Amino acid sequence: MSGLSLILEELARALEPHGLLLRGVVPFEPGQGGPDLADGKPALTLVLIGNAGGSLWEPFSRWRKLQPDRGGPDPLDRWSAQVIGPLATRYGATAYFPSDQPYQPFQQWAMRAEGLKASPLGILIHPLYGLWHGYRGALGFAEALDGGAEQRHQPQPCETCIGKPCLTHCPVEAVGMERFDVASCRSYLSSDEGKAGCMVKGCAARNACPIGAAYRYPAGQLRFHMQALKRL
Ligand code: B12
């Protein structure tokens, strides 16, 4: 078994109780776009970590209840750092987080790691999880580790989706192939209609997607993400 396979096995075991899973590996050639490690050298291997469906919601919610400040203004980011940060230290890796600035290209990494493509909404669609997945962090390694192959070809369910309901269910037509009108979305979310609609039921466009229905986020998680979207 190669060095990376062993690390991946241990990482998967360490992440599982937190409802997180490995979301693929991206190899980089020296000088070809790997993010900088803590010591300024480029990462040659990147391991993506994320959630599928509501996998993280219970562990995260349990943790949050124990925090005197309920996890602060960005509890999911703080929880992610507390879970993933120590793993970076253990393996001498550099941790990256999706909300940290400057933004790292998590979606580009995910396209390479799992062969995913963008849905008309901009978020990546997974053939099994549909739109119900996300990224909580990544670990960058200085070494070109063997054992994790890039997956370049996954089926892209949107290509054969008849009617594309994600494009027709937004109550304020904020989503479209060319753009996501964040201002219209937010103003709707603040209205009475929005408070009783997407704010409690989750994004209507995302909900309309027929793929990965079994992985749809639980009600509490849907509300949590909508609140974050409204306030960002
Ligand atoms: C800024 C940001 C937003 C902004 C602006 C998005 C935009 N127009 O680019 C706002 C606040 C509007 C937003 C909204 C949402 N976001 Co957002 N967002 C980000 C963030 C933090 C940075 C994006 C970025 O600039 N990256 C920098 C560039 C260099 O990276 P990149 O990989 O090359 O960029 C890709 C994106 O820009 C993408 N893209 C282009 N247009 C759009 C439009 C939208 C709506 C999105 C989401 C992406 C997107 O295309 C690029 C692919 O190469 C990322 C995390 C991250 N670090 O990537 C999450 C991220 C892209 N968001 C995510 C999600 C889930 C959402 C929401 C669904 C959350 C919610 N609460 O409902 C909504 C989308 C609502 C909808 N109806 O589609 C997920 C996507 C997961 C996936 N399956 O792909 C990410 C990866 C965060 C995560 N932790 O997993 N988001």
Image: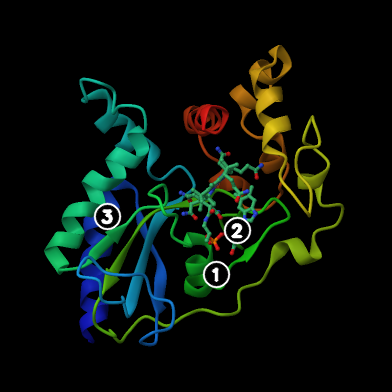
Task: Compare residues 56 and 143 and report the one nearer the observer.
Answer: 143
Residue at horizontal 28 percent and vertical 62 percent from the top? 12
**Helix, strand or loop at disc 3?**
helix
Could you say which disc has been placed on residue 228 in the image?
A: none
Mark 2 or mark 1: whose residue is earlier in sequence = 1
Instruction: Report the residue marked by disc 1.
Output: 111
Residue at (69% x, 32% y) in the render: 183
User: Percent from the top left, x then y, of residue 82?
Assistant: 22, 44
The answer to whether the residue bearing label 2 lies less than 8 angstroms from the nearest atom of ligand 1 is yes
Give the left or right position of residue 8, taking residue 196 as reference: left
Q: Amino acid at mark 2?
A: Leu
Q: Could you tell me how far apart the alpha carbons at marks 3 and 2 are, in whole angstroms? A: 22 Å
- Residue 146, compared with residue 62, is above or below; it is below
Classed neighbour count for the residue bearing mark 3: other residues with Cα under 10 Å, few (<14), some (14–19), many (≥20): some
In the image, which is nearer the foreground, mark 3 or mark 2? 2
Q: CA distance from mark 3 to mark 1?
A: 22 Å
In-front residue for pair 192/10: 192
Q: Amino acid at mark 3?
A: Leu
Between discs 3 and 2, the one toward the N terminus: 3
Residue 124, numbered circle: 2
Q: Residues within 10 Å of mark 1 (few under 14, many from 20)?
A: many
Q: Callout 1: helix, strand or loop?
A: helix
Quadrant in which residue 27 is drawn: bottom left
User: Cβ(mark 3) to ligand 1 < 8 Å?
Assistant: no
> Is disc 1's CB within 8 Å of ligand 1?
yes
Question: Disc 3 designates what residue?
Answer: 15
Occupied quadrant, residue 173: top right
